Image (spheres, helix red, strand yellow):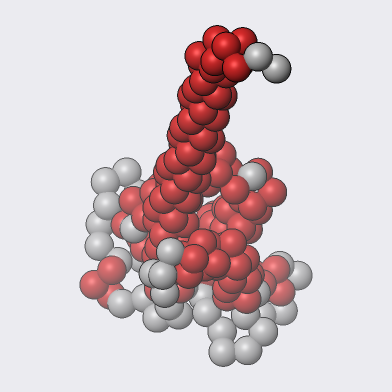
Amino acid sequence: MDAVVIWDRVPAVIAGIRDIIVAGAAVSTATVGWKALNKWRDETVGKRRLEVAEDTLSAFYQVQEVIYDARAPFIAASEMVKEEGVPDDVVRDSAYGPIRRLRQSFEHIRDLRTKRHRFAALFGREATKPWDEIEAVLNEMNAASEAILSLRGQNIPPRDPQAQFIREQRQILARRLEDDPIVPRVDTAVKEIEAICRPVIRAWGRS
C-alpha cells in the first residue's frame, strides 16, 4: 500500500481508537456508578432493617416483661386503690389486679403494636405472626378478668359447676410454677421474633 495513503488514514484510525477508549471509559464509569448505587442502596436498606430489628426485639422484650410482671400471683393491698369509674368491689378483686398492671404499662404494649406494619414492610407479613400470639394472650387475660368479675368468682364455692371454669381463668391471670398456660406462649413469640431479628443484628456486628 502506498505510504501516502496509509499516512492519510492515520488520523481516522486514531480517532476511531479514541472513540473506543472514550466509550470504554464511559461504560466503566457507568458500571462503577451502578455498583456504587447498588452498594449505597443495600447499605441503606440494611441499616433500616437493623434499626427496625433492634427496636422490635427490644419492644418484644419489654412486653414480655410487662406480661410476666402483670401476672405476679400476689396482689398487694397498696395496689387496690380507688380508681375513677371503677367500682370499689372491682378494685378490691384480685382478678382486676393483672389488668390494672397491664394498663399502667400500656405504653409498651402500644409501642409494640405500632412497630408491626413497618416490620412487615421490611421482613414480610408472615414475619409478624408473633404479634398475633401476644395479642391473643392480652385478649385472654382481659377476658379472664371480665369473666371472673362478672361471675363473682371470689364467692363461688368449690363444688359449684362454674368453679372449674373460674380456676382456669385464674390460671390465665396468675403465673404458675408448672403447666403455666401463658408463659410458654409468650416465650415462643419472643423466640420467633429473635430468630428473625438476631441474624440481622449479628450481621452488623452488634451482638
Residue at the image point whose x is 60% and y is 17% from the top: 3
View extreme (right): residue: 161
Query: For the image shown, how many numbered marks are present on the structure?
Result: 0
User: Left or right of 6: which side holds 25?
Assistant: left
Residue 107 appears in view? yes
Q: Position of residue 8 (x, y in %)?
A: 55, 10
Name the foreground residue: 185 vs 98. Answer: 185
Residue 95 appears in view? no
Residue at the image point whose x is 71% and y is 74% from the top: 164
Above or below: residue 70 compared with residue 40: below
Position of the N terminus by quadrant? top right
Residue at the image point whose x is 37% and y is 76% from the top: 75
Name the foreground residue: 13 vs 167. Answer: 13
Q: Position of residue 36 (x, y in %)?
A: 45, 40
User: Left or right of 12: which side holds 110?
Assistant: left
Q: Position of residue 26 (x, y in %)?
A: 49, 26
Position of the C terminus by quadrant? bottom left
Residue at the image point whose x is 56% and y is 84% from the top: 176
Name the foreground residue: 7 vs 94. Answer: 7
Give residue 4's quadrant in the image: top right
